[in-house]
Every structure is written in structure tokens, then in C-alpha cells.
Amino acid sequence: MYLYSQFDEDFVRNRVAQFRGQVAKRLDGSLIEDEFKPLRLMNGLYLQLHAYMLRVAIPYGSLDSAKMRQLAMIADRWDKGYGHFTTRQNIQFNWPKLNDVPDILDALADVGMHAIQTSGNTIRNVTADHFAGAADDEIEDPRLVAELLRQWSTDHPEFQSLPRKFKIAVTGSPNDRAVVKAHDIGLRMIRNESGEPGFEVIVGGGLGRSPFIGKTMREFLPKADLLPYLEAILHIYNLHGRRDNKYKARIKILLHEEGLAIIREQVEAAFARIRPQFQTPSDELVADIARYFRKPDLPPRGTGSFEGLIAANPAFRSFTETNVANHTNPDYGIVTISLKPIGGTPGDATSDQMRVVADVAQRYGHDEIRVSHEQNLILPHVAKADIPAVYAALREAGLATANVGLISDIIACPGMDYCALATARSIPIAQEISTRFDELKLENDIGPLKIKISGCINACGHHHVGHIGILGLDRAGVENYQITLGGDGTETMSLGERAGPGFSAEDLIPALERLINTYLDLRQSRDETFLQTYRRLGTGPFKAALYPQTTEQEAA
Amino acid sequence: MTRKANHQVVTANHLLEGDAVWFTARQDWSRDIADAAVASHEEAAQALLNAASKQQDKVVGPYLAAAAIDANGNAAPAHFREAFRTRGPSNYFHGKQAAGA
Ligand code: SF4
């Protein structure tokens, strides 16, 4: 496991002590909320519908067993015995009391963690593929680049007051698991014709109120040019991004309004100027970072009883089919632990489950755990010979749901069960969908399908890029759910198309059933996924399934 | 067309626990919306909010919320968001619904 360089013990302890003082002052009335609110937000403390919420940072979604056990301890001691892993690859505690928060922050610091939030109009935390360092399609570990970018951008004098916040994501392989086309800058590692690694540089993506797919600014950027090129992009954005309207200030709007060609020309000109004098990071720094993310030594292990158990045990076989991905080392696998039990809350883990994951990671997983933006946990390096034991331990803890990538592996934001900004609930919708399709025993037949649910236009549930996206709205005082179809968050990204008028919570599930049945009827074979069928046929038949009456009326 | 009376209550989150509370006629805060003071016109509502806003050492973010009157003549939530605030989340038996049990 790497040592995270951002974690500066003195700095964090100081911040906790300061915050302890601020909480005391808030409680004795010498600070009013207007003064206190920015302070608590900086420390990750939000106020939701029913309680405070503490959002704990998990850089690159990477944890080890000690951290996971401490999160479990915090959940038991100061919360209600569980935590919620989010689409931002962090964990939220939904029930802390204000006066306990400084103690929680100290407990986090004990294991090198914090809840400090990057805020303001700066370059925010850089995110990377959750399979980093393990995936068999990976060219290089994207966290090295991500960490380099973080160090380059932190305190960069030119970029402390950008027009708006700025998010960068990196994937180390051509297959995009980090939704890079939905970030201000997305970097996709590829090789050029001569086999050298470099990046496709994608700019101006984003979800939320005005969703855009990022556009390719450079087909191939050599690795060595990465920092000066990004500096050029940021420079142009800083000059021309709109500061007059917060809804139009992201780089996606600049690109949309000015056009890619014009911005590209400006960026390339700035790049040509910047590059000759650019101070490239020292070899020591690069070597230091590489050391933090050093891959564990993975001795050859053979596959033990792995193949035999697949043949003998159908439940284990489905688990390996959905929840185990290929590792660079053929003796190993990447195990995804689904936090989507049938009928459960997407992304929640109890303290007992966290401890089981910690034990399993320590014993069988080289002490590495990742959090995915799809709200699951990942053991990136497990010997195939150990997967049967891992499976048994997970199953005992209710953590072996074999549904990764299937209809019940739903992303859902907290929605109006917790979030103060929500316009409708999302969790109960996810619970009903997963329960219903489990009853129908259709899940495996349906195959790969991503449903993503947001409880408001802010799109934390990434509904625009769900094969089926669901957006909860308030229509005249009633929860109403709008369906979008055909979204995709990978390297073939597309934004879902709104199907038509929204549905009430009761009508939504039957509508989805009609939609899925239509897909099952129309697909050419079991191998054609929902998204492929949708792309082949267009919206027509799916709209007809969702709105049978309207279609009949039109026909009449 | 009969227009519904414009009933409003003042609600906020408790400073320490963060849970929903309502401003009462005794100028303090209750965890039960039924105890809330109800304003029936805009002026009264503003007066209520002003009084409540002086108590920022007890609560966070007081605001006016539309209310209904239940069969017992007490305040009740008029919108689903406010109804959820009287109960707690729907995925676990946590929050107010659990405290009342
Ligand atoms: S999408 Fe809206 S409701 Fe959901 S978590 Fe984000 S802000 Fe809250």
C-alpha cells in the first residue's frame, strides 16, 4: 500500500483542533451559522434533511484494511452502524452529531484520513480508474498521472481563481472506467502507431444541468507533454471562461459557445509558447510518486481449486462471471464486492461488512481496497486460488451478490431520503427495481444493463449516462420520474435521450418492465445488449413500450 | 374555486443533532410538527420567521414551509419533502419515525 503524500499529519491535526474550537464557538453562540457554514463545509460537514452528514475523502478511492476498520469503528461509535459509499468514490456518514464531529475527524487522522474538501474555483481532486494497477487492459497505472497532476495544480499561482471549479479524470487504459468524457478534462491513455504511451485529451465534458460529452482536443499527446498541454488548456479557460454566470462558467460552455476548433487553435498556440520554458517535474518526484503506487509483489500461485469450483458450483460460477475481472497476472483476479444486495440501498455497507472486507483484503488481497464510482468495493489483487475462500467469507456477510454490471447493480444518489437539494427520492426506486427484476428471475437473461438514478438535476447519480437513466422531479407536489434512454458512460459515451413525460413512482416499475420485455423481444441474440439493441433500433419501439396509449392514439 | 388558506409554519434543523424542528407559539422549538405555530397570512408568517430567526444559537436555517391543518386542528406537512422531514428516510427505520416508536 502506498503512503499518501497529501496526508500531512501536522496539517490535518491542526485543522481538526481549529475545527474543534469553531464547533465549540458555534455551540456557545459566539459564531452564527453564516460564519460557521463555510468552515464546516471545508471540513466535509454538510446539513441534510434529517441530520448532519460527514463526507470523508478517499483519494483515488484507495483504502487499506486499517482505514476500513476505522471507518467501521466510526460508524458504530458515532453513527448508526453503516456508511454510504458514493459515486464520488468517498464515504458519507449520515447521522453524526455536531459535537462529535471533531472526535470523528481525529479518529480519521489516526489512520491517515481526513474530511477536508477541496472547494472553490480551483482544480479539484483528480480521479482515476478503480481498477488502477490491476486491469489487464491497462497501459500504465493512471494514479501516477493523477497524483502528478494533483501536485502540479495544488497551489499553482495561475489557477487559484478559475471561472469555476475544474475536474480532471484519468484512465490508464483505452477502456474508460472513470467516465473521463464527463469531466472538464478527461485523459485516456492510449498507444500511438509506434507503440508509445500517451493520452487522448478530452475537454469540456460534464453532467448536471447542462450535460455535454467531452470533445477530443488532441488525438494523441505524448506523455512528456502532458503538463504543459494541460497548463495551456487551463490558461485559455482562465482567460476566456465566463465569469458572469455561474451556470455558464464551466469549460464545457466555453467550448460549446466558441467551438472546438477555435479553442483548440488557442490552446495549441499557448502550448507552443509554454512548452519550451516549462519546468518538467524532477525525476525524483516522479520516482517518489511511483513508489507510493508500487504494485504489490504477486508471486505465481496457479489457480488452485478455482476452475474446479466454477464447474461444480453454479452460484460461484455466476459470481466469477459478473464480479471477477481479468488481472494483468493470469494467476490473479480483480474481485468486485457488490454493495447492491437485492432490495438494499446502493452503496451502503454495515460496520460488520466493512470489517469483513478489511479482513478479506488483509488476508487475501494484499491489503488493498478500492471504492468505485459505481458504489461498489474492489479487491484489486486476489489470487484465483484464494477466490473460493474470499467468496465464502463475503457470502457469509451478505456481500457476494453476483450482479456487477447487471440490472440490479444500480447507481443511485441519496436523493430525498437524505439530500437537502433533492426534488424526489431515488433509493426506494432502486430498491423496487432490484426487487422486482429479482422476482421475475430475469436478471441474468437481460445481461449487461446500467440503470442510474438521480434525485435532482445535479445528476450525482449520473442518470444521463445510464443505459436507462432515471431523474426524480417534483411535479406539482408529487414525485415524478423521467426516463432517459441510451446513455453510456464509457469510451463510447452518449447522453441518454429523454423518452417522454415522467412517471409516478407506482407507474415507473411497470413501465420499466414493458421496456425490458421489449428489449428481450427485439434483441437479435442473447449477446446483443440493451444498449446495442437500442442503438440499432433507435427510440421508436422503446417509446412505444413506455407509452402504449399515446402510441395507439397516434396510430388511430 | 375555493382557495386553500395560506398556512405556513417555520421549520429548521436542530443545531446539535441536525434533525427537523418546528417553531412553536411559545417561541421555542419542537421535534413534532403538530406543535408548530401556524401563520395564516403572509404578515403573520414573516413575523413568525423573524422571531424564529433570532434563535440561531439553537437551530440552523429557519424557513417558512407551507402547511396543512389536520383533523385535530394541528399543523401537518403540505408537501412530500416536509412530510419526509417529519418521519426520516424511507430505506431505514431511522430518524423521527424511530424516536416515536
Ligand atoms: S443528484 Fe441531487 S438529490 Fe442526488 S445527491 Fe446530487 S444534489 Fe442530492
Image: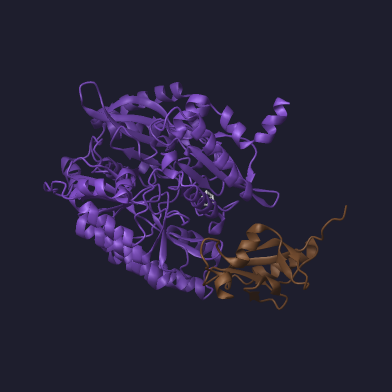
Chain colours: A purple, B brown
| Rendered view: A161 above or below B49 | above
| Rendered view: A324 above or below A544 | below
- Looking at the image, which residue is at 44% across and 44% down? A443
User: A544 or A123: which is nearer to us?
Assistant: A544
Write down the quadrant of residue A110 in the picture.
bottom left
User: A192 or A152: which is nearer to us?
Assistant: A192
Left or right: A449 as drawn, with respect to A201: right
Residue closest to the far left: A300
Write down the quadrant of residue B80 in the picture.
bottom right
Residue A406: where, in percent of width, then height? Answer: 42, 43
| Rendered view: B79 above or below A483 | below
Left or right: A467 as drawn, with respect to A546: left
- Looking at the image, which residue is at 56% across and 47% down? A456
Residue A453: where, in percent of width, then height? Answer: 51, 46
The mark tally for this picture is 0
Residue closest to the far right: B1
Residue A232: where, in percent of width, then height? Answer: 36, 31
User: A370 or A278: which is nearer to us?
Assistant: A370
